[in-house]
Image (cartoon, rainbow, N blue to C red):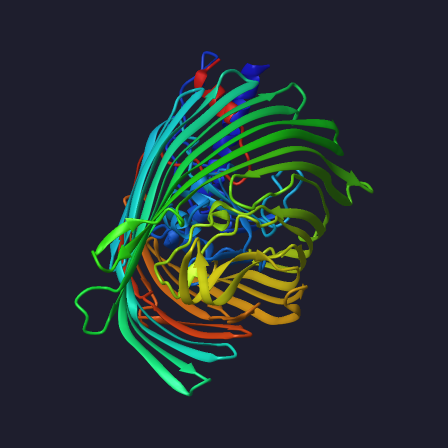
Amino acid sequence: MKQLLLPIALLSIVLVNAQTTTAGTTDSKPIDTVKNNQVKNIQEVIISGKKAIVENKVDKIVYNVANDITSQSGATIDILRKVPQVTVDADGNVELQGNPNVRFLINGKPSSIFGNSLADALASIPASQIKSIEAVTSPGAKYDAQGTGGIINIVLNESKVKGINGLINASAGTRFETGSLNLNFRNNNFSLNAFFSGNAQLKSRTPFSQDRISHNSTNQTRLLQDGYTDFQRHSYRTGLGFDWSINKTNTLSGSVSYNDFANKSIGFINQEQYINDFSNSSEQSIIGYRNSENRSSVNSIDGNLSYRKTFQKEDQELTADYVVSYGSPKSNYLQTQSLAGAFSPYDGISGSNPGTDISHNLSVDYVQPINDNVTLEMGTKAIFQHITNNTDVNVLDDLSGQYQSDPFQSYHLKYDMGVYAAYLSSSLKLFNNWLDVRAGARYEYTTVKIDYQNTNIPSYSLLVPSFILSHKFESGETVKLAYTRRVERPEYAELNPFLNFSDPHNITTGNPSLKPEIGDNMELGYNKNFESGANLSFTLTERINSQDLKQITTFYPTYTVNGTDYTNVSVTSRDNIGKEYNSGGILSGSVPFFNNKLNLRGNMMLFHRYIVSDYFGNVDMGFRYRLNLNMNYQFPKDFIIEMFGNYNSAAKNIQGKNPQSITYSIAARKQFWNKKASIGITTTNPFNRYIKQATTVETGDYSSYSVRYLPLRSFGISFSYKFGKMDLKKDKDISDDFLNAASQGS
């Protein structure tokens, strides 16, 4: 029977290849024929049927980066700006359907690199190493409940072709430089892949100014600051992975990666402070300047080992996974204040904040098909996270000019969290396959222990139900209704009470007393695929966050830290403020023209937020919206030009207003050497050196107006080269066992 199946399978490949060649999309080398009941190796097979760049699935949106030719020279943060329902502001802050509390994964697994600086982590992964980005807006019970905004999964490239192949990518420009190398090896039942990448954001200057007024019953203080910061970033990543098909039913896979990224910011600020005393109508002025330096770095090692067992019954399988991540984040600052004309500073402080972030994830999942219409899934998971932190603060002695350790501001922090979870979910087809139902529930029990003064967080449990009801019409339309509950457990940077005094008048810190945010998310969606290749998607969302986490600024005329007084200080940290209602609508689509030579993709999001808070009262946050448009044109001889524009409106926050941003880019890429090599050029905001970012903060006794000019203008050139076997491109899943069996000749 097997000898009969192999020729039939080979014939199907030939027919598919012939059809695609007729369509003018690919060429293929001849395939060896079957002789004497033996099958020779398939040296090179190209199965075409290119996926759309954007795929709308029932529970997620998939952005196929590998098919977006002009995106290959950027980083993950650049790609996210193009993903429907995702918003990225000028500082790299990411939102999914209007919610910033997003859970990031790499190949479906957590990583400690996201815990300290999300912007640095997303800038450290080159786009050339990414296969796709999945925006999971309605995660099922199998997913961890972390992330009230949903999940963004970064899927890295992999090769399914037997033999050795790889990809080299390099780019250089006025603001960014990147380089990466991917190597893949696959034998009959074993594959190995390795990668190395590095990138650097060159030093760029960001002008800054602030005008803030604070007052109480006796005096008013106005602080004027004007200066700049020079910022630069670098990172590199390397890793090794394997996949071993032990036999037809047992597979073992694993990987290990090392990540290193760091940034540095050096600033110079002129300061003018005017203090009016109402009691005697006097005015005091302090004129001077401040020098500051901030450094942040993370080194991490991520490893995972996965076992998968399939059974004779189709789709029945058992998987077991172990994921470990060890990170060593570190941040430090140094700042001095000097009076105008003085030879030495009168005030200064430095702080160092090294730590560790270790997590272990163990999970077991089982899938049991009952019949053609019912499938059950169940599993358990345990997560253990251990964070340590050591803070060392030194204060300048203005008499000796030396920095002396301040034991009152130095401390140690230990944080331990355990999450124990179990879930049960099912997939059903009801009413003669008219209605698809995915329903389930997940139970998570969380224990938290913090070794920090006056901090005690009790253990808590959470039941996480979810369901998706969907129907697909024969005309290509799909309608869905989804509900899921999610939780946002505060991350390391939000909990760490480290006080950053790089600007002693604007201090930032973490809050170890944060409670988890609970989100109830509802989604009603419609998607239509047209025969012409066009697509239209419309989604209505309602997100309700309890114990909502927001960034809050509090003003202190005198701020005391373990016996040391600081005057005229605003302190910013996260806090639980109450409940937020976030209602929105999302419209996206794509339209091809001129036999798919021209393609337009657009995305529009509109959200309204309303907050109910015991502290702030009921606050109507108003509307905010995002628009983007992507246009590319495919010229003859594998030459493509793309233009992309993105607009994020200004948005009211709980204490003021966040700025709007406008970004646009133009890219072109030429493929040659039978599409194995390409060269591209990219420019971002070429006609504007800076984009203005104006932020306001208003409290009862404090108001601030800050302006930053972000240097986004850049020009760059990139080159990529594929070597070895060609990539296996497939529109539908094709069994890897079939390809291996064909080459084994058994």
Which sits in the foreground, 117 or 689?
117
Horizontal and vertical percent position of residue 282: 38, 86
Image quarter for residue 566? bottom left
Horizontal and vertical percent position of residue 157: 42, 38
Name the image quarter holding the N terminus: top right
* Residue at the (53%, 67%) spot, across then down: 626
Horizontal and vertical percent position of residue 681: 29, 58
Determine whether, in the image, residue 256 is placed left or right of residue 263: right
Q: Residue furthest bottom?
A: 281
Which sits in the foreground, 586 or 702?
702
Any part of residue 629 in sight: yes
* Residue at the (74%, 42%) spot, across then down: 437
Which sits in the foreground, 524 or 14?
524
* Residue at the (41%, 25%) spot, across then down: 191
Q: Residue furthest front?
A: 280
Which sits in the foreground, 133 or 533?
133
Horizontal and vertical percent position of residue 19: 49, 41
* Residue at the (18%, 73%) spot, across then down: 341
